[in-house]
Image (cartoon, rainbow, N blue to C red):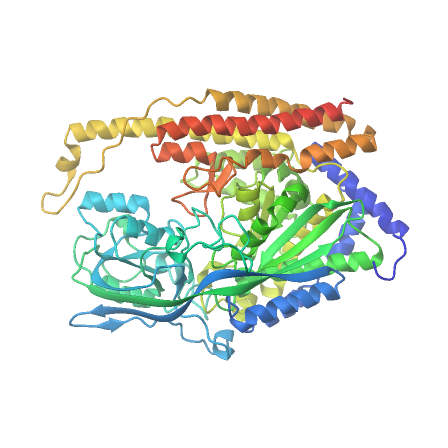
Amino acid sequence: MPGKAKISARFAIALVAAGVLCISAALGASTPVASDQAALERNFDALIQPNQLRDWMKLLAAQPNHVSSPHDKANADQILAWFKEWGWDAHIETFWVLYPKPVSETLELLGSTPFKATLQEPPIPGDSSATATDPALPAYVDYQRDGDVTAGLVYVNYGMLDDYKMLQRLGVSVKGKIVIARYGGGWRGLKPKLAEDHGAIGCIIYSDPAQDGYSIDGTYPDGPMRPPHGIQRGSVLDMGLYPGDPLTPGIGATKDAKRLKMSDAPTIMKIPTLPISYADAQVFLAALAGPVAPPAWRGGLPITYRIGPGPAVVHLAVKSDWEQQPIYDVIATMKGSTWPDQWVVRGNHHDGWVFGATDPLSGQVALLAEAKAFGGLAKQGWRPKRTIVYTSWDAEEPMLLGSTEWAEQHASELKKKVVLYINSDSNERGFLGVGGSPDFQHLVNQVAADVVDPETGVSIGQRLRAKMRIAALAPTASEHTRTEAKIAADPDKDFPIEALGSGSDFSAFLDYLGVPVLDVGFYEEGHSSGVYHSRYDTFEHHSRFVDPGFVYDATLAKTVGRIVLRVADADLPAQNASAFANAVSDYLDQVKKLANDEREEAAIQAKLLHDHAFQLAADPTKSSGLPTALEPVPDIDFTPLNDAVKRLKSSAKSYDDALAKNSAHLSGSQITRVQALMLNIDQTLAPENVGLPGRNWYKNLIYAPGRYTGYEAKTLPGVREAIEDRRWSDANRYAKLTADALNAYSDRLNAATTVLSGG
């Protein structure tokens, strides 16, 4: 540490207090923050200046910063320079990934009234969209398959599995057709995948104003929502198989890495796909005939929504430059004073689709504020006990490339050293949102109780609890929402955090390495989705509508900074095992209910088919079809999981009780042994040689993104998705494999309990 020979007394005391606080958090105690710890955190807060976050965003969002753009590399260099200026040991790590760049795109309606889609967004005067000198990407989705096709058009609503079941009921086929789907209902990459699975030869995706435009609020620049010619870019890589570089699954995409042939890469889509605006989509949809769309399929455009096919005929052509491109991860390290080989890793990405002000730079400037504040504390004499690693990822938008390649390249070291990975991405005004590993749920609650909401003056935890309680009053509130409300109403209980699947840079850590993660942000009141992945996600939009004054971006920095600080300085593990055990118990109840519901659905449908009910209920003047008959659902042997969860709950309680009873009297040797047992306990849930059926990159048997839901988490995924897909042998097999993983977790808890109890 430059200029300091020893830690000042004030910060030495605060350092000890930080460890004491995190011990109490691990115990589930509700004791208030120690005064010295509170002083340290107030000092950290004082170093967070919203005006600095504003200035950083204005600079980083000045030009388009997509992968391969000059500004993306310039931003990486600038972030590296800042880290070094603030006292971090920092470097850029470069990977080489397959990244297609658009060469030409065409989408046109043929016939007597031809129309050609614009495929680019007009600039808005006074906005960065009008002042930038670098070109913006046109309407484009990465990793679609290039092609030139002409065919009739079919509207498929969201283009999800249930929508194709409805088309089957309506007697409409998409085979040999181009489909048009609206955003929503599931992840965009499933839309071309499911279209191709059902025989379509092209896919168009548009943003409907019912979800993403004037039906919600005023449109930009008068309001925050997507204007008529706004386009949502994105990736359609089949991340349900694996994220990251499609040519190097499971290994880092270094310059000399062994690569698949592009023709053998299973995650690249098979049909050409383009996104368009709702102004252009209206022309294509209005040209459709055929049956009127069901009520749930009708959006906010002033037309009669029809399904087709035809008479509209569409020409769709896409050509890309499929070359390897360099990507630039910025890695900064502050070495720990006591346990340098235990790491707390913090990340956010710096690449965007165009200017990327809210997504991702709102989270990026929060990360920078934290890094600068930690550098300031270090200059005053503080030093973390554990090593802190700050990461600014590149190429998240094409599908988590920067973080995935880094995690794959350093997998062995990360599995040995990482205590917790903390992620953020977009951020806006509103309520705290946290997802991740439930064994860190109590720590999140402790932090949330100590951070002040900048607009209400209460804690961010208190405001979130109020929101959860109100949500239960809605007539459509689920049983899950009502249960959460009851928990939130009790100040002695922790509000729950959400399960995570994928969708941001935590994925490789959680799903592949089995490392515990937290994903943190503020949401809901800034309407940032209104310009998501468009040319209008600019500094001006963010500062006017999403987070005026940058106060919630600063609050994100204060929130995550506390989590980093408390985990880095805790003398004992920060996990609360009972929170994890209770969550898994809930997941098992859900899966058993799913099996019963599927069994009942199959029985009801069989009776309806037998009674010819579908034919009798159909309109005889219109085409229709029968649903595919469902197989009867056999009994599934949940005994191994039932026994494992029962044992897990007992082991977790014993561990938490032993930690609470004995933490003040542990020797240095005991602390070292407990740390060794708990450091990588979550990796027992991601056994190396198992993986999920058909996609073994995903190792975690408790959490994964759904194969046909996209980012959304599937808990106990091996069992749950086997039931959903009616793979009964897999359901029984993964019930046993998941039980084995949970028993390994319990074994580790029991060993730690023995150490805590003096054994």
Q: Taking 563 as reference, is 666 left or right?
A: right
Number of labels in the image equals 0
Q: Is residue 323 above or below residue 211?
A: below
Q: Taking 428 as reference, is 313 left or right?
A: left
Towards the viewer: 278 or 417: 417
Q: Is residue 312 above or below residue 474?
A: below
Towards the viewer: 725 or 308: 725
Query: Which residue is depicted at the point 51% across and 42% down?
Result: 470
Note whether residue 184 is visible: no
Locate residue 754, reporting x and y percent. Answer: 72, 23
Q: Is residue 437 above or below residue 159?
A: above
Locate residue 251, reporting x and y percent. Answer: 53, 50
Residue with the most extreme left position: 621
Locate residue 551, reporting x and y percent. Answer: 63, 60
Note whether residue 568 is visible: yes
Query: Which residue is depicted at the point 86% across and 46% down?
Result: 13
Locate residue 351, reporting x and y percent. Answer: 54, 63
Which quadrant is home to the N terminus? bottom right
Q: Quadrant of residue 717?
A: top left
Q: Quadrant of residue 283?
A: bottom left
Which quadrant is home to the C terminus? top right
Q: Taking 467 as reference, is 147 left or right?
A: left
Query: Which residue is depicted at the point 78% across and 23% down?
Result: 758
